[in-house]
Structures are given as C-alpha cells and as structure tokens.
Amino acid sequence: MTERTDKPLVDVQGLQIHFGSVSNPVRAVDGVDFQIFSGEIVALVGESGSGKSISALALAKLVPEPAGRIVGGSVNFQGLEVFDLDNSELRKLRGARIAYIFQEPATSLNPVYTVGWQIGEAIRLHRKGVPIKAEVEKLLASVGLPDPARAAKAYPHELSGGMQQRVMIAMALACDPELLVADEPTTALDVTVQKQILDLLIELRKTRGLSILLITHNLGIVANTADRVYVMNGGKIVESGETKTVLRTPHHEYTRKLLKAVPRLRKET
Ligand SMILES: Nc1ncnc2c1ncn2[C@@H]1O[C@H](COP(=O)(O)OP(=O)(O)OP(=O)(O)O)[C@@H](O)[C@H]1O
Ligand SMILES: [Mg+2]
C-alpha cells in the first residue's frame, strides 16, 4: 500500500474495548489501528463477533456502557480527540459529523411519522435556517427516490426495504456529515437491491466527497465497493491494504478463509 502524506479524517490508534468483568474481560477490540481518509470508502470486514460494530461505534464514543469499556487507545477525528470530548461536544459530533446507518432500516425508522417529517427533524436539530420541505425533497432525490414529494409523505411501512434504506441514508445525510458509517447496510436486502444501495454509496462519495466506513462480513461486497479494506478477527486487524491487493494476494489465513466463503466474486457488468 502506498503511504499517504495527507492527514486522515479519522485516525484510530491502539483501540481496546472490553466487556464483562474487569478481572476477566472479553477483549472485544484488542489494539486496533485504522485510518479513513477524506473521500475514501474503507471496509471493515470480518465474521460475526470479530469486533467490527463496536470499533465503529467507538468513533463517536458510542460504546454501550457500562457493559462495554474503552480501556485504551484514541480516536482522532479531524484534530478532535474524541475520547476527551464532553457530552455537549459529543452531541455535536454524533449525527452531525459522523452519521450511522444499520442493517434493519425498519427498526430505525419511527412507524408513526412520515419519512419527510423524520428527515425534517434531523435538519431542524442540526441545521438551523435551512428550508425544511425543500431540503427534505432534495435529500430524497439525492438518494434516488423517483418521486421525492410523494416519498416524503409516506409512512415507513408503505416503502420497500430498499426504499427504507435509501430513506435512512437520506436521514443520515440530513446533517451533512463528513463520515458515514454503514454497518451491514445491505444484509437485510435481496441481491439486486443490495447492489443498488452499494452503487448509491459509491455515487454519494463522488458527488458529496463523503467518506464511508462500510462494515460487512462479505468480501464480495468489499470487492466492488471499497478502496481499502481492514480484515478483523478476534478483536484484532489481521490484514489491511488496498482492496485489489488484499483480494488478489491475501496473506493471512483468515482472509483466505473469508474469500472462500464468497460464492463468486463478480465484477461489475
Ligand atoms: N452489549 C454487549 N454486551 C456484551 N458483550 C458485547 C456487547 N456487544 C458486543 N460484545 C462483545 O464484543 C464482541 C464484538 O462485537 P461486535 O458487535 O463488534 O461484533 P461484529 O463484528 O460487529 O459482529 P456481527 O457481524 O455479528 O455484527 C462480541 O463478540 C461480544 O463478545
Ligand atoms: Mg456488527
């Protein structure tokens, strides 16, 4: 991998997160380093329980407490030492500069409000003075919803899973974040819709200069989407590099195992 000389947007060093008892902890994240540069799509890949989600939540100091404890390391986000921030500074970081989307859009959307209202709330909270209705429709159009005015009036259950995930992405973008963390964003979707959502992420990186941390257990998804990849196993990064290099010449036994688990790596047609 070529060394970059510019400063990363996110710089994680020596991150350690424990669960359970202090005397005999579960070392869920055990000394992890990774970087995300501006405009990059970086994948964190690994099997279930390897520590991907917890590492990603730590970027905004969102580790579930008191069960989980950050016991070591640092996260630097554009010069901010995240673990040193107080609650009001953390609120400004969360949602506004680092936004998250998760696997099940339906569980993150409120069933009793229209999607337009929910996206509007995010704008109201973080961006005072922005005309809400126009901005909601602009956001819905930017995530590929064909009739934004109509979509804004819909309740979540009236939309398909793929459309719900597009709405979640619109909501995440409502505050104009610098980093989008997408934690298994397509796992609950069928393959065709999965590809559409990944294409949307690639497009948003291009049009908005968005940086994306993409979490997945599927190296097939990584192949077509990410610039660089970090492979996690048992709370540690076992391999990292440019996606093409890692997939072509995996060095670590565990990466080879993950590659074998992908039925076939299809190139974009
Ligand atoms: N709320 C919790 N309480 C106790 N232990 C937890 C909790 N959340 C995570 N852990 C521990 O941290 C480890 C890593 O969890 P994490 O959610 O980061 O895994 P993951 O790689 O995202 O897995 P998956 O692919 O299933 O989402 C788990 O194996 C578990 O030991
Ligand atoms: Mg997870």
Image: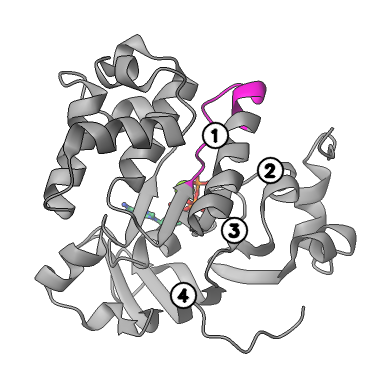
**How many angstroms separate mark 3 from mark 4 (CA)?**
12 Å
Tell me, yes or no, whether the highlighted magenta stretch contains residue 122: no
Element under disc 3: strand
Q: Tell me the residue that label 4 is attached to.
A: 9
Element under disc 4: loop
Question: Residue at (37%, 31%) from the top-left corner?
Answer: 140
Q: Which mark is residue 221?
A: 2
Q: Amino acid at mark 4?
A: Leu
7 lies left or right of 192? left
**Comparing marks 1 and 4, which lies closer to the viewer?**
4
**How many angstroms separate mark 2 from mark 1 (CA)?**
9 Å
**How many angstroms separate mark 3 from mark 1 (CA)?**
15 Å
223 lies left or right of 182? right
Q: Toward which corner of the image does residue 244 lie, by quadrant?
A: bottom right
Question: Residue at (80%, 49%) from the top-left corner?
Answer: 259
Name the spot of residue 9 as percent of width and height, x first: 46, 75
Pointer 1 or 4: first along the chain? 4
**Comparing marks 2 and 4, which lies closer to the viewer?**
4
Q: Amino acid at mark 1?
A: Thr
120 lies left or right of 29? left
